[in-house]
Image: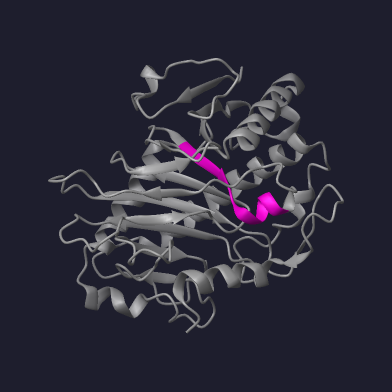
Amino acid sequence: MCFVSAITARSPRCEDEWTLLSPVLSMDTIPVIDFDAYRLGVTDDDVPREQLQELRDEVRRAFTEVGFVYLKNTGIEQEEVDNVMAISKKFFLLPVEEKRPFSRGSYSNSVNHGWVSLERESLNPRRPGDLKEAFNTTSLRTDIEWPSDGVDDFCATQVSFYERCMKLSLRVLRVMALCLGIDPDVFLKAHRQIGSEENGSTLRSLYYPPVKTVKEDQIRCGEHSDYGSITLLFQSREGGLQVMNRKGEYISAQSISGTVLVNIADLMQRWTSDVFVSAVHRVLLPPGGDSRTRQSLAFFVQPDDNVMISCVDGSNKYPPVKCVDYLQSRFNDTYGRN
């Protein structure tokens, strides 16, 4: 049976301490939904109709009222997440000169693939560069240069987890279509080429090093909303992520072991004529004297490059836009046009 619980800024992070609240969401909570009925490995025919209906209703409520939701029992286990983070951290701890050959922009087949150095991005252009590093897995090709020295199985681990996230994201997208009462394959048809060079969906390993010196107004990750369809986020135990609610107030989005935090991105909000909401979020600096690192794994789901995004309700609230054009304009804002 699916159920909804919710976590607030003061809620404990342990699964067995979740506080069950009313199914009616408040603006100060991010709901936790049991995805077991449609977890990886379950076929469509195996999902009882009443459970799928309940799941659909809970997901709709979360994405229309908050824009974020925790999913538990998805089929992706915590051990998988921990393994990807451990191998990723080995790469991030390498000397800069050993990471530089794998920089984003150095791969001819995929401009977004590769390492992003500290302060290279400004997700809020009004702030100094973000205090984080990243490795973007956008290409799944094994005949390109991947980090290997000191990071055995880096390529295999990233590609395998990418494929796991891809499968889960397609299930979430199908449930989202059901939420809207439209053809359940509408979103799936627009994401057919995930994992190919005709789709820019990206698994992003993120590393936030210990904070030493800080510029004025600098934080670990500036205020922003995501660009594409949806994002799947797996976090380490260290906090810092905050989500803006519908009242314009920030609430904490803590790490809950065994869950994935899923959020709506801007293109999906446009696609659904603002039915699903894309929430602004950020990662704050740790408290003074806290030298802990932070890690996360974000799977950014995008439609295929050449898909035209038009409002699914048939309205003209937003003009049609080609996916690749829209996303390129957002990347230009983050990295600059050069």
Residue 176 in sight here: yes
Task: Look at the picture and state if 204 lies above or below 177.
Answer: below
Q: Residue at x 19, y 55 (%)?
A: 211
Farthest right residue in view: 314
Seen in the image, is 218 located left or right of residue 233? left
In percent of width and height, residue 167 lies at 60, 47
Q: Nearer the viewer, residue 161 or 3?
A: 3
Q: Residue at x 19, y 47 (%)?
A: 292
Farthest left residue in view: 289
Seen in the image, is 274 located left or right of residue 300? right
Dividing the picture into quadrants, the one containing residue 213 is bottom left
Q: Quadrant of the N terminus?
A: top right
Q: Nearer the viewer, residue 212 or 75?
A: 212
Query: Is 265 within the magenta?
Result: yes
Query: Is 162 within the magenta?
Result: no
Task: Say how the picture is coloured.
Answer: one colour
Report the magenta residues as a range.
Answer: 260-270
In percent of width and height, residue 63 lies at 62, 37
Dividing the picture into quadrants, the one containing residue 150 is bottom left
Task: Look at the picture and state if 103 lies above or below 155.
Answer: below
Q: Residue at x 30, y 59 (%)?
A: 217
In percent of width and height, residue 332 lies at 52, 74
Tag count in the figure?
0
Task: Look at the picture and state if 267 lies above or below 258.
Answer: below
Residue 141 in sight here: no
Q: Residue at x 67, y 44 (%)?
A: 173
In percent of width and height, residue 252 lies at 39, 36
